[in-house]
């Protein structure tokens, strides 16, 4: 394993985002939305510009008769996306493997 | 001099609670009881020996925590010490006690 | 209750003190949504933005996801806890 010191040089949380520039990242948003895409730009609010984005939307419906929860996920591809930071819950960079 | 109660600032009231057990009612169906260790201008609080009460879709859940930093953003009410201890017993003695959240109309 | 007792700095621990003391330690971060994240706290800032390592995501006490590194936006944070949590079930 060749993980070096400077690779893990995370002094403040936003460094984690900075180190993910031009990488594909996972973004968990409010209202059960998830994004996977390449991070082109971001700012301190976590406003982000993502490219080649796959958006996953999860909905839960209750069956009228059986009262069973029906979980549905719908996906769509978006070439470019501006994400407003206030909707962001979590950002995960790609696994940095040696 | 802040001895005049009418001139007591809210932050001074909380400052007096440092070292004592306090009860915090959050926005949403959550309450916490714990010993206040400190707080800041946003009323973020360091609490110790915490019991967290929450109402989830799967019923009531009680969680014990050693030490936490509680975000002040969602704090609704901090009842007085008199409200936290009724004579000889403490509010934490009642895992089955009524939560404020129980009083609200609820889907569950 | 006297209310006049002196409080030495030994008994007080401000949020800033707490944050300094927990870097590199295992923590539980609970969000307002009720979701828990357990992992090693790498660092955090004044907005309660958090960087964590070896992060596990728990929804209703069930493990739902794992992330190598995770950035959590501070406005979603309900609390940061040092302890391993013990669950007493209510229901």
Image (spheres, grey):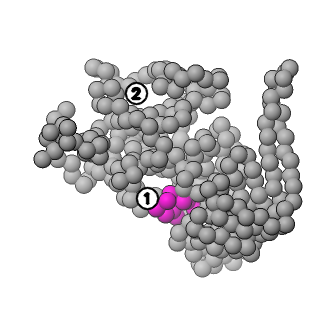
**Viewer-closest of C53 and A65:** A65
Q: Identify which residue is drawn at 77% across, 64% down.
A: A81
Residue lying furthest front: B6
Is residue B67 visible in the rendered structure shown here? yes
Q: Identify which residue is drawn at 79% across, 40% down.
A: A59
Element class at badge 1: helix
Q: With B55 as the anchor, is B48 left or right in this view?
A: left
Q: Is residue C44 magenta?
A: yes
In the figure, B65 relative to A24: above or below? above
Quarter of image, res C51: bottom right
Quarter of image, res A43: bottom right
Marked residue chain, label 2 = B
Residue named by callout 1? C19
**Viewer-closest of B4 and C56:** B4
Marked residue chain, label 1 = C
**Viewer-closest of B96 and C85:** B96
Q: Identify which residue is drawn at 65% across, 29% down.
A: B57
Residue named by callout 2? B92
Please state the extent of the stretch shown in magenta in the rendering.
Answer: C43-52
Q: With C12 as the anchor, is A30 left or right in this view?
A: right
Say whether mark 2 and mark 1 are on the same chain: no
Element class at badge 2: helix
Is residue B51 visible in the rendered structure shown here? no
């Amino acid at each position: 394993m060749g993980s070096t010191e400077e690779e893990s040089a995370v002094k403040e949380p936003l460094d984690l985002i900075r180190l993910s520039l031009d990488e594909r990242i996972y973004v968990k948003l409010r209202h059960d939305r998830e994004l996977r895409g390449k991070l082109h730009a971001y700012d301190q609010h976590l406003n982000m510009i993502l490219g080649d984005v796959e958006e996953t939307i999860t909905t839960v419906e209750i069956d009228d008769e059986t009262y069973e929860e029906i979980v549905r996920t719908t996906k769509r591809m978006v070439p470019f996306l501006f994400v407003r930071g206030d909707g962001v819950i979590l950002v995960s960079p790609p696994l940095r493997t040696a | 001099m802040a001895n005049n109660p009418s001139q007591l600032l809210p932050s001074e009231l909380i400052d007096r609670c440092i070292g004592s057990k306090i009860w915090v009612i959050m926005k949403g169906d959550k309450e916490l009881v714990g010993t206040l260790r400190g707080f800041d201008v946003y009323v973020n609080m360091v609490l110790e020996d915490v019991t967290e009460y929450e109402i989830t879709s799967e019923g009531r859940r009680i969680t014990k925590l050693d030490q936490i930093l509680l975000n002040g953003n969602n704090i609704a009410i901090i009842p007085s010490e008199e409200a936290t201890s009724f004579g000889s017993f403490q509010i934490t003695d009642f895992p089955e006690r009524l939560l404020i959240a129980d009083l609200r109309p609820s889907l569950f | 209750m006297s209310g006049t007792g002196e409080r030495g700095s030994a008994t007080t621990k401000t949020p800033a003190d707490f944050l300094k003391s927990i870097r590199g330690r295992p923590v539980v971060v609970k969000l307002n949504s009720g979701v828990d994240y357990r992992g090693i706290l790498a660092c955090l800032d004044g907005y309660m933005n958090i960087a964590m390592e070896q992060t596990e995501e728990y929804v209703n006490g069930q493990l739902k996801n794992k992330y190598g590194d995770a950035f959590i936006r501070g406005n979603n944070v309900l609390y940061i806890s040092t302890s391993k949590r013990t669950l007493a079930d209510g229901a």
